Image (tube, rainbow, N blue to C red):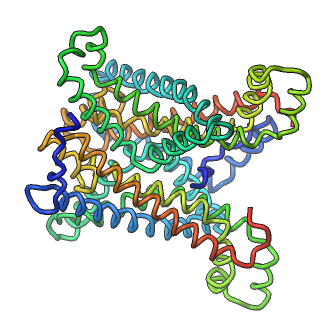
Amino acid sequence: MPDMDTITPLRPATGAQLLAGLRGLLMPHRLIMLALALTGLAAMVTQMDWSWLPAYLPRLWGGLLTTLWMLAGSVILGFALALPLGVVQVIGPRPLRWLASGFCTVVRGTPLLLQLWLLYYGLGSLFAAYPVIRETWAWPYLREAWPYGLLALTISFAAYEGEVMRGAFAGVPNGELEAARAFGMSPRKVFFRVWLPRAVHRALPVLTGEIILQLKSTPLIATIAVADLYAIVTRVRQATLLTYEPLLLLAGIYLCLSAILTIALRWLEGRMPSGG
Amino acid sequence: MFQSIDFGLLALNSPGWGGALLAGFWRSIQLAAGGYALGIVIGILGAVAKLYGGRVSRDLAEIYTMTIRAVPELVLMLIFYYAGTDLLNRLMGLFGAGGIDVNGLAAGILVIGLVQGGYTTEVIRAAILAVPRGQIEAAHSFGMSPMRVMRRITLPAMLPHAIPGMANLWMIATKDTALLAVIGFSELTLVTKQAAAATREYFLFFIAAGLLYLILTLGSNVVLRLFERHARRGMVAPR
């Protein structure tokens, strides 16, 4: 399957570009559009029913934190899993290679929602059926929904990133690795000092795009009753019977989150030394 | 537990759920194919608006793709579904017609198509940009009308550049149909959940559904490879 390349993040903007962007904003038709958007926003704030908002604000905040925790946890754990998945597909022995690429294909070929429900309902009912598990320390956690959500998100991220890292590891020029070996570095050292940093560096633009995609997958965990942002908004909709207001707020929050995340990741990417 | 799995539950006729699963699978394929096709129509319009449009249409297309790519698919689908049916009903009410029940399949296709359109716009825009300018200019200087240039030159010439991205989008479309289960469309994932909940054989049904999805994605992968080879014929040095 071809790699996702529709979300290539843009280069970091320089001061001059920002100024040009500002000047671009002042073109007459954009001023009119901006005015229209602002009147639309004002109409939304004044005409629509937002009386529920103050009461739900603390819960919305909690939901936002849950969403961010799930995103951060699954990205970190998933990336840690993606590294071995990538390496094994490049230099591993054949059975391991098949296993890793099979894992990536299966996870990438089926919907995340299906995986999530398989883990939550399937594993959940399996665990509950064995009294032995009920007595272990893990049971209080296994009874909750979030570990399954985190697991499903992690597996999904690991599979997509394993594929990305496979390409990145394979793409590091062989001469660099040979040079490192010629310096007398041990295989371990070659990996940690040359191969891994170069591969991560190559994969970085794709990885930052994938993190945004991962943010957009997180609301799925609301379907297994994890109280993330989306779940809270669903509760608001059920309690207030409003159609538009909670959904518009939700879309607005995700727009802001994506924008903040994009800018932060772009900044991070810009700080990475890019020596060839 | 694995000894006790009753594969008879997958039988095509009741009490087996196989028939229901296959019906859901067929519905998923219809939703994916319809949404994908609608996405291509929106994508071509969006790409043309972005590349050749006036200032306003260019900015509007930019806002559309930016929003689609920044907001989760699930949220977009809910907004399009609820807002779409609600607006349609109000519109019908304005014209004096009573509320109508929106056809489920059409609503699902519309929702998936609107989401896909945002991504398709970007893929097609990039592919059109990859076509050498001279080819399009030559067509214009032959006196072809803009529509004919589009149909005869730009679209066929951009096809090989668009195929990797479009193949990827097809995979995303098939998997996005599962999200419609949350809204309550009885496609494969929702049918599977119902079957699993009714029989309490979660692994059996979810793995069976996973296999169906895999057959679809891997099968279409093979077809897309063949199609790519066809579209790339005569091109020098495939990437």
Q: Residue furthest bottom?
A: B143
On screen, A54 above or below B59? above
In percent of width and height, residue B184 lies at 23, 50
In percent of width and height, residue A5 lies at 63, 51
On screen, A109 above or below A232? below
Give the camera-side residue of B234 and A59: B234
* Viewport quadrant of the N terminus of chain A: bottom right
Q: Quadrant of residue B152?
A: bottom right
Residue occupying the point 40% across, 67% down? B33
In percent of width and height, residue A34 lies at 56, 47
Q: Quadrant of residue B214?
A: bottom left
The answer to whether residue A191 is left or right of residue A65 is right
On screen, A99 above or below A196? below
* Viewport quadrant of the C terminus of chain A: top right
Residue occupying the point 26% across, 40% down? B203
Residue occupying the point 61% across, 30% down? A83
In percent of width and height, residue B36 lies at 44, 65
Give the camera-side residue of B195 and A149: B195
State how many labels appear: 0
The answer to whether residue A136 is left or right of residue B8 is right
On screen, A223 above or below B188? above
Give the camera-side residue of B44 and B59: B44
Residue occupying the point 44% across, 68% down? B38
The answer to whether residue A225 is left or right of residue B109 is left
Give the camera-side residue of B1 and B188: B1
